[in-house]
Structure formats: structure tokens, C-alpha cells
Image (spheres, coloured by chain):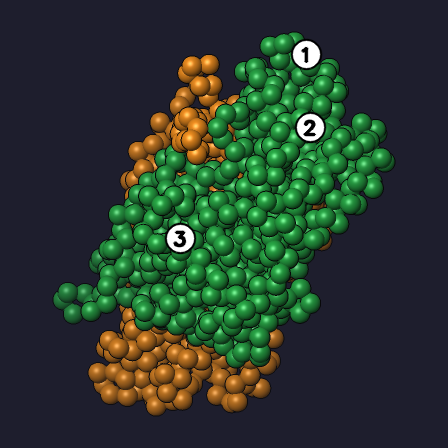
Chain colours: A green, B orange
């Protein structure tokens, strides 16, 4: 007799549903690799499994393989990982995904959610292996990779699963409908409501933070009955391949086709995304990545459901503070964390021309800039401190963007901080950079009005505190922003600033000072991306993220009258 | 002190939310015009109000009026109604809609839902007036118009309002988030979640059944904070104008702008829809009408949210029955009701070549056809019976379609029943027709694979019962269907037929015999349109209909540490 996976995980699911409602802090997954939190030898086994992948063919169920693909390089060692992945035939992948959906759809929400909970549980067992895989593809520091591809990503996956479960649970399986029409006798109809998937879905994960956005899309799709075709960024296939392998084994053990989730790997030179984006049977696209390609998908895949999370120009508006160095440390920390390669990293730092009000009096913009540079320096001057904070650059493109910005800087102002490489103590060949800061003091050009992916920031001066808020919010509205930040000691200004950014569709963190990485977004508590500005149209995780992934088909059968 | 409208209507709202969950029969509105159910004199007052509209300018709040528009003719009298409506300037309408949304969005879900409940309550007071308005524009018989623009439409509006209220209620206004990061002290964040509208919304209502689809869209939009621009079909403006006037007066009394709902009337010769469909600030389109234009909106308004309910080729599959005349009566009734101008009317009647199994033995297709014609004749032979059932034809286009079909019939088979006019006892000049039935027995062409709007049906013969189900379902999948019907006495066949239509995304009614109009769809119980075939992408009313009409913007403010 098969195990009832739903019953096995029901308590955890219910707790997660409660967390989505309460929106406080909660997680069933360990965020830290501390030995106390994991089984004996887990770290070693994870490392061995990762090492064992290198230079090998990765075993997955891949329909109609046309050969081998994949070219990943470690941003830390500069060496290719040498992992090769089967290159499945897109037409076969879509066909088998559709075929796999038949019994999966018929299984119903309860069974699907049970299997998804089991997958999440098993993915938690991959945390160490996946941390190394994420580190050596995306470039994240190990501790961040452990949380970012582990607990934090699983939490976002579980959150999306909860929302899907809540949405599906709103609809009963059956109902009895009884009424009289005009003078007739009572009619009884037995109604049934069947939830139908709309997929398959293409999930495109990003190169810098692959699991955090992929798992929500994967579980939103799987739980609602849709097969997933997971197309990872060509630079970060391995973390996704490990996840797909685990998911396939759980699905198979539960009696379903492994092709409910299929890896569609590619290389930068031989991309496959278009084969799926143009396939008429792919009905859903979940995309994380650049705003440019995200907008292309939104505009061109109009016959599909499209969910995007891209990027914007996040602002940090510094107006007044009881602790200037605390605020500057928070901004500097946001700029340095994973070298600003997170979609919640601040980019545009706005100061009022009159200066920032502090307990010491007004501090002039020039002094604030100097202290900001010092705050960044304090975090990255010592490579032993820089390494676990900044990690490595996901791609050589980041260095090119920095070079270009350095060259352009004199046109809009001047370079405040050069942002050269630091020497990683463990990986001397690591691709690294500390933040490049540009002081925009000329007539402002629009350079800051788009994302500069990587450790780059702009310091901008506004005519007044209100002007700083207004311009930062307007940039968010027009050009996109995922997370903005403000510091002010004035209670009224807190309210007007929150209002202004809300109008721009940008989430705002206010007076984040203390032991908190400012660009941290918590599953179950933080809604990530609003859909109200160009930074993406989908939110992790609201009901809109899940409710269209399934539809209701009903039937009604009239009961013969008792006398007949 | 203003009245707390939410508190006033809370019990009814809660009962409606319960009905959406239980999905049995429920309604707070009287479906019948019976004197016992309405205040003394309500019918007379309604008639007087309707008569008072004729030949007059209709008073509404209409921004930037460019003159007067509107040309409606009664399908019963053939006379113009002579009601003239201000023709507002689209640019001004959109601007004022946006302006009106500011305080409406700020009011929050509870207040908005309270105002919407009050509007519904007040619309219920318009039932008699609106019944005459609907009769003399759409052509519905009076009793149908009374229910169809009254209780049935208000129920669908209340249902949509419930779904929006449920979706918005899932998100708390505030949360307290507390956790420690690494070795730091506990951080406390006060989080707020603000719901933001995305509109304005354009709601395009149809000519034959205007209120039933309009109110769900109107209340889904208003409750989530979006202003509505209501563009009625040029043949059926008055029922919508009456509703807009009532809604405007409630909104104004509650302290909001009347431009939260604006009528955008037009004529067939001077259409205004494109001005709104092409306006970049119109963010939502709710469309009810032809499949052709609905598909155009879906394909072309890709930067807007588009919700459509259009049409398809609904099937009635007759396989076996314990009561052949009962089943044929049910089909005939569906064909005659409002002259098949309902989107749930059957069109394609499928029979197995071997005949229909009955207690009398197999009845041959030819005999079934003859008995179907007799069943239709029985319903419409007497004009006194035909009139309250079939009503009038919404547009002269229906007659043209019937002429065309009569001419084409010999190419696909033969005319089974001519379907000429009947003479309405009260309105001798009424535009009427009884069902035209075409027997398709040649090599089947695709004539039946699209909606023939009006009293037209096809009888088709399949090679077997399974073939009949398969072909009817395949037509639904490829060409759209909103409601299909089947009759079979075989329990297994019931299941396989339900499965097959579910795969085609078509709702199915099975063995509907008795005192039930087969094309009746009940709010709170029947999901209307699945979104899984070309008959529309939106469902009345699932969560997907409401969840994207608002988005969440959050803020988080760090609390100073107690010791500081």
C-alpha cells in the first residue's frame, strides 16, 4: 500500500498555511550549515556528492536525448565543472510532459500536494550538495548558497505550494443543488467540480539565485497539475539538475512519470529557450532574469500565461537618521552582499542637497558620500571579511558592465569608489569586485534608471527630502524596482514615503539598521515583486501567482425523482 | 456620522460567502415578479420609471460630454426608444476614472465591499424598471428579463464580490516579524500590506443578456479598487444606464466620485470601444460578446488584463434514455428559450447512427429527428405559449444568419424545421423566430463548428455513442463550448462522457429532464466558462477572476531596540 504522503506532511503544511496568514517569521528548514542542525556527516556527504558530479554525465530522465550539453565554469576557480547533461528533444519533452499530466491531473490536489511536500523534504536533504553547486555556478559565498539554495528557496517553494493548496481547497469536489423551478417539483443535481491544469509550464531560472525563484514556480505548477520544463540559465544548471533529479525520483516512487519535471539544459552558444517559448503547447512561462528578456516574453508569448520577475533600479533614500553610520553600514552591506547580484540590492542612493539630518546636525552630501565609501571599505578591505560577504561575480559580463560604467562616469559626475577586484583567500583566481560607486552630480542622465547588475551604485542628490522620495519613487514606477529603502526619523515622513512608494508599486523597508541584512526577503512574510512596475508581473507569493494555473470544469447529473 | 455599509450588509455577505463554498442553491434576491415578493406598487412604479425614460435624455455623470448618442429600438415594437445618453470624451473618462480611484483605493477592502453591497441592494430596487428596459432592448421575454437582469444577475455580481472579498481577506493589513540573524539581537519589523488596484477597467457588456455578465465584472473591479468604464452593446444601453445611475448615486452618497463607474455609450455607426481598448491607461478589459471580437481583444490588448466570455458550439448528445420525449422536450426547451440567444443554449444535437436506446427499444435517428421537431412544435405552435418562452430576436442580424443557414442547408443535409416567425400576441410587430433545425447527414462540413447566434440547431449523426461523445467534445475543445448536455442511462458512460468533456474544458449537464430549464446556470453553484477552450478565458466566478485585479505593496519599518 502506498504511503499517504499528504498525511505524512500535513502538520507541516498546516503550519505553513498558518504562517502565510500570520506573515511572521517561520521556517521548517535549517538556514545554517551548523553541525548541530544536520545529521552526522551530512556536510561531508554533500561535498562528496558534489565532487562526484564534476567531469561526469548527470543522470536524469530526459526524453529523446540529442546528445550532451552544458558548459559551466566556477566563478571561484575559473575552471569548467565538466558536468554534461542530456540535451532532450524539445518536441519530445513537451509531448511527454503532456502525457505525464494525465494521471497527475487525475490524482487530484491532495495527492499532488502530498508528493510536492515529499519533494520539498527530499530537496532539504540536498542542501549541502546544492550549496556547493550554487557556489561554483552562481558565485554565491558558501553560507549564502547554503541558505539561498536551501532553506530560503525551499520556504518560497513551500509558500507557493500553500497558496496553491489554499486556492484549490476553496473549491469543493462535490455539491448537491436542490431547488424548484416555477411550479415544478424539486430538482436535485449532483455537481462535481474538477480542477484541470493548463500546462505544461516552462520555468526559466536565473544565473545568480536559481533556486529561490525556481522552486516557487515549480511547486505552483506541479501542485496544480502542470508538468514543468525547467530551463536553467546556462551558467547555473547544476543546482537545478540536482533538484530535478530528486523531484523525478520522488515522482517515480509515487507512481508518476518523471517527465512531470524535465531539465532542458543549454549553453550560451546553443540556447534552447525559444524552442519552448514558441511551442504552442507550452501554456505557462515562469521567467526570472533580465528585464529586457522578461519584457520580450511578456510582449511576445501572449497566448501563454507569463509570470516574470526581472529587475529594476532599487533606491535607498537617506533623509534623516539617529545613527548615520548605522544607516550607511546598512546600505554598504546591501551593496556588498553577494556583490549586489541580488534583485533586492540597493543601487541608487538618494541624498537631499541640504544634507542628512542627524543627532550631530545636518551632514552635507559630500560628507555622507565620504562616510559611505568608508562604510563600504570597512566591509571589503580585508579579503577574509570580503569573501564570505561578497562572494564572486556570476559572469564576466559584470566586469564588462563595470568597465563601461567607469568610462561613462565622467559624463554624469565622477567615480566615488573605483571598485576593483579583491583577492579571495581560498580561491586566488576567483572573479571578484568590490562596489563601484558613481557620484551623479551633473545634470542627471538616465544611467541610473536601469539595473546595473553587480556591485555598482549611484549616489544622487535631490533638491529636498520630498524631491528625493519623489524622484526615487518615480524611477521605480517607470523603470521598475523590487525593493527600496528609506531612512527618516520623522513619523509623518515615514507615512508619506510609504505612500509614495506604494503608488509606484515598490516595496519599502524603512529604518533598517540593526542586525538585519537589508535585502533579505522572508517567505511567508514578504511579498516579493508587486506586478505594478516594470520589475516583473508576478509576486512571490500571492494568490494571483497560482489561481490561473488550474481551471474548474464542472458536471451536473440530475437525480431521478424518488417516485420514478 | 456615515453609515457603516459593511456592517449593514455583513450578514448577507457572509451567507453569500458560505454559498460560494457549499455551492448549493441560495439567493437573497427575488427571482419572480410575484406581487407577494415586492413592495406594494413596485411593478407600477417600475413601469412608470421605464416609460418616463423613453424619448428623454438620461441623466448621468459623464465627463467632458461631446454631445448625445444612443440609438436603441425595441425588438417588440420595432420603435426607437428615443433615449439619449451623454457621449463622454474617452480621454476625460479615463482621467477621471484614475482620479476617482485614489480615495477609493485608500478606503480599503472593507469600506469598498460595504459600498458594493449597498449598490447591489439598490440595484435590486430597479428590478421592474430594468426588466422592461432589458425586454425592450435585448428582446428577452418579460419574466426572463425580470430574473435575468434582476436576481440572477445580482447573484452573479454578489458571487464575484464574495470571491474578491475572500481573496482580499487572505492578506492581513499588518504583521509583526521578529527574528535574530546570526548572532545578533532580535529584530522586530512592523509590516504593512497595502492592496493596490491596477485599473481602470473597461467592461463591455453584450446585447442579449447584458446584466448577467456585466455585474460580476463591475463588482470584481469596484471591490478591488478599480474604476469601471461600462461600454454597453449599442443595442442594449438602457439596462446598463439604469444600473450605472444607481451605482453613481450610492457612490456619491458614500463620499466617493461618481466616476468610479462611467457609462460609455455608443451607436453601431459611431463605436467608441477602440478609444478605450487602445488607451494605455485602461489596464483591464472584461468582454462579453462574439468569439471573433473576444479573440481580437485577447490577441491585441496584450498589455492589459483581458477577461472574456464569448460563445461556442454547445452540444447535446443523446445516447440512451428512459424517457425519450422527456429528453427531447429538454433539448427543444433549450432551443426555444429566448430563441437560443443564451450562451448556454444547445446547438449541435448528436445522435448515434444505430439509434437511441429507450425502454421502447432502439429509436432510429429519423424517428428521433421527427420527435424533436414535434417537441419544438409543441412549445411554439401556440403564440401565447411561444411568446413568454422565446421572446424576440435581439437583432435583425439573427434573421440574416437564419436566411444564410437556410440557403446553405442543402450543402450539408436538409432543413428539418423551417423556423419562421411567430406572431407575438401583445406585440404584432415583434421580431421573432422559432427554431430552424438542419439535419446534417452528408459529409459533415464545419458549419456547426461555430456559434449560430439565435434559434438554430444542427442534428448530427455519429457512428456510435462513443463517436458522438468524442466528436462533440472535440468540437468543444477546438471551437469552444460553454455548456454541453448528454443523456445516457449507462452509469459507466456517464463517467466517460464527463471525463471526455472535462478534457475538452466544457461543462456538462447529464440527464437533465424534469422541471429544469437545461441552460440555467446558478450563481454560487455553477462555474460558468472554464477558460480551457475558445469560448472565453474567464470563469464566473473563480478566484482567478479576481486575484489579479489588485496587487500587494508592502512596507516594513524596523522598531528601535528597547534599550536604545
Residue B81, above or below B375: above
Circle 1 residue? A362
Mark before the other along the chain sequence, 2 or 3: 3
Counting every numbered tag in the picture gives 3
Question: How far from the left and from the top, in percent, is residue B173?
Answer: 43, 30
Identify the secondary structure beneath mark 3: helix
**Residue sitting at 80 percent across and 27 percent down?**
A441
Left or right: residue B490 versus residue B497 is left
Question: How far from the left and from the top, in percent, is residue B138?
Answer: 53, 53
Marks 2 and 3 sit apart, C-alpha to C-alpha, by 37 Å
Circle 3 residue? A43
Circle 2 residue? A373
CB under 8 Å between discs 1 and 2: no
Q: Nearer the viewer, residue A426 or A328?
A: A426
Identify the secondary structure beneath mark 1: strand
Query: Label 3 neighbourhood size at 10 Å, few (<14), some (14-19), many (20+)?
Result: some
Chain for numbered disc 3 = A
**Residue sitting at 46 percent across and 48 percent down?**
A146
Q: Nearer the viewer, residue B448 or A361?
A: A361
Whether callout 1 and callout 3 share a subunit is answered yes
Amino acid at each position: 500500500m502506498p504511503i499517504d504522503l499528504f498525511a505524512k506532511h500535513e502538520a507541516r503544511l498546516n503550519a505553513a498555511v498558518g504562517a502565510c496568514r500570520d506573515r511572521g517569521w517561520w521556517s521548517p528548514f535549517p538556514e545554517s550549515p551548523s553541525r548541530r542542525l544536520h545529521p552526522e556527516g551530512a556536510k561531508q556527504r554533500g561535498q562528496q556528492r558534489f565532487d562526484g558530479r564534476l567531469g561526469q554525465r548527470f543522470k536524469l530522465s530526459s526524453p529523446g536525448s540529442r546528445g550532451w550539453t552544458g558548459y559551466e565554469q566556477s566563478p571561484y576557480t575559473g575552471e569548467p565543472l565538466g558536468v554534461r547533461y542530456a540535451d532532450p528533444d524539445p518536441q519530445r519533452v513537451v509531448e511527454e510532459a503532456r502525457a505525464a499530466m494525465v494521471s497527475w491531473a487525475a490524482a487530484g490536489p491532495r495527492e499532488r500536494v502530498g508528493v510536492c511536500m515529499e519533494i520539498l523534504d527530499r530537496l532539504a536533504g540536498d542542501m549541502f550538495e546544492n550549496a556547493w553547486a550554487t557556489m561554483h555556478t552562481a558565485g554565491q559565498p558558501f553560507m549564502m548558497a547554503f541558505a539561498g539554495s536551501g532553506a530560503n528557496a525551499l520556504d518560497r517553494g513551500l509558500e507557493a505550494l500553500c497558496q496553491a493548496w489554499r486556492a484549490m481547497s476553496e473549491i469543493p469536489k462535490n455539491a448537491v443543488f436542490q431547488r424548484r423551478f416555477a411550479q415544478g417539483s424539486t430538482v436535485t443535481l449532483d455537481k462535481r467540480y474538477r480542477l484541470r491544469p493548463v500546462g505544461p509550464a516552462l520555468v526559466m531560472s536565473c544565473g545568480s539565485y536559481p533556486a529561490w525563484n525556481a522552486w516557487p514556480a515549480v511547486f505552483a505548477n506541479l501542485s496544480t497539475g502542470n508538468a514543468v520544463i525547467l530551463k536553467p540559465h546556462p551558467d547555473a544548471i547544476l543546482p537545478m539538475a540536482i533538484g530535478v533529479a530528486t523531484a523525478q525520483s520522488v515522482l517515480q516512487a509515487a507512481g508518476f512519470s518523471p517527465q512531470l519535471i524535465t531539465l532542458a539544459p543549454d549553453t550560451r552558444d546553443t540556447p534552447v529557450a525559444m524552442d519552448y517559448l514558441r511551442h504552442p503547447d507550452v501554456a505557462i512561462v515562469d521567467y526570472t532574469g533580465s528585464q529586457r528578456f522578461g519584457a520580450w516574453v511578456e510582449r511576445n508569448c501572449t497566448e501563454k500565461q507569463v509570470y516574470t520577475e526581472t529587475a529594476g533600479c532599487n533606491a535607498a533614500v537617506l533623509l534623516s537618521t539617529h545613527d548615520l553610520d548605522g544607516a550607511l553600514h546598512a546600505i554598504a552591506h546591501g551593496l556588498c552582499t553577494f556583490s549586489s547580484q541580488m534583485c533586492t540590492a540597493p543601487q541608487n542612493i538618494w541624498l537631499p542637497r541640504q544634507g542628512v539630518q542627524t543627532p550631530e546636525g545636518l551632514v552635507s552630501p559630500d560628507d555622507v558620500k565620504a562616510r559611505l565609501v568608508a562604510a563600504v571599505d570597512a566591509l571589503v578591505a580585508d579579503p577574509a571579511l570580503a569573501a564570505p560577504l561578497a562572494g564572486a561575480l556570476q559572469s564576466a559580463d559584470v566586469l564588462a558592465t563595470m568597465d563601461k560604467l567607469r568610462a561613462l562616469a565622467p559624463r554624469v559626475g565622477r567615480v566615488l569608489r573605483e571598485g576593483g577586484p579583491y583577492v579571495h583567500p581560498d580561491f586566488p583566481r576567483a572573479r571578484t569586485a568590490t562596489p563601484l560607486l558613481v557620484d551623479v552630480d551633473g545634470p542627471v542622465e538616465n544611467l541610473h534608471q536601469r539595473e546595473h547588475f553587480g556591485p555598482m551604485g549611484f549616489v544622487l542628490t535631490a533638491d529636498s527630502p520630498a524631491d528625493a522620495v519623489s524622484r526615487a519613487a518615480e524611477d521605480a514606477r517607470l523603470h521598475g524596482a523590487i525593493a527600496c529603502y528609506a531612512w527618516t526619523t520623522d513619523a509623518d515622513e515615514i507615512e508619506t514615503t510609504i505612500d509614495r512608494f506604494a503608488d509606484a508599486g515598490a516595496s519599502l523597508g524603512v529604518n533598517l539598521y540593526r542586525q538585519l541584512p537589508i535585502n533579505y526577503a522572508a517567505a511567508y512574510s514578504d511579498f516579493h515583486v508587486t506586478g505594478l512596475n516594470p520589475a516583473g508581473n508576478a509576486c512571490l507569493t500571492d494568490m494571483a501567482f497560482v489561481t490561473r494555473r488550474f481551471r474548474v470544469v464542472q458536471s451536473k447529473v440530475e437525480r431521478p425523482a424518488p417516485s420514478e
